[in-house]
Image: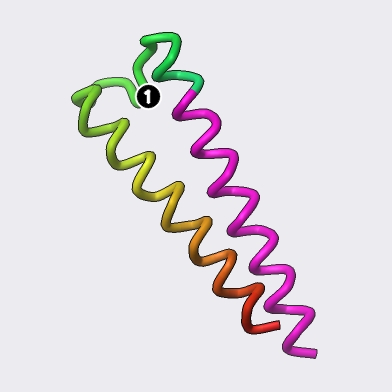
Amino acid sequence: MESVTAGFAGAAFALFGAALLVWTGARTIQRAPVALGVSPVASTALATLFGVLFLVLGVWCFARV
């Protein structure tokens, strides 16, 4: 049963991380703000960092299956 939970968590983390990276990349290419009211460099860096972090966490969950 734990493998089902780890698979679901891995899929959720990986999908969120990939979507966050795609969205951040699209906003950066369009030169649009990633987050309103925040420094463009800081918001892009943090969004990229968390996108990669969620992808790595998703892969780690899949490795536990």
- Residue that badge 1 annotates: 34
Give the magenta range. Answer: 1-25
The colour style of the image is rainbow
**Which residue is at a point 37% across and 24% down the rendered structure image?**
34
**Is disc 1 surrounded by few (<14), some (14 to 19) or many (20+) residues within 10 Å?**
many
Name the magenta segment's main secondary structure: helix
Counting from the top left corner in percent of width and height, residue 1 is at 80, 90
Counting from the top left corner in percent of width and height, residue 16 is at 59, 48
Mark 1 element type: loop
Amino acid type at image mark 1: Val
| Image position of 37 (left or right of 49) | left
**Which residue is at a point 66% across and 73% down the rendered structure image?**
62
| Image position of 60 (left or right of 38) | right
| Image position of 6 (left or right of 33) | right
- Is residue 6 part of the magenta span, yes or no? yes
Counting from the top left corner in percent of width and height, residue 7 is at 73, 72
**Which residue is at a point 79% across and 79% down the rendered structure image?**
4
| Image position of 48 (left or right of 23) | left
Quarter of image, res 47: top left
Quadrant housing the C terminus: bottom right
Q: In the rendered view, would you say 27 is above or below 14?
A: above
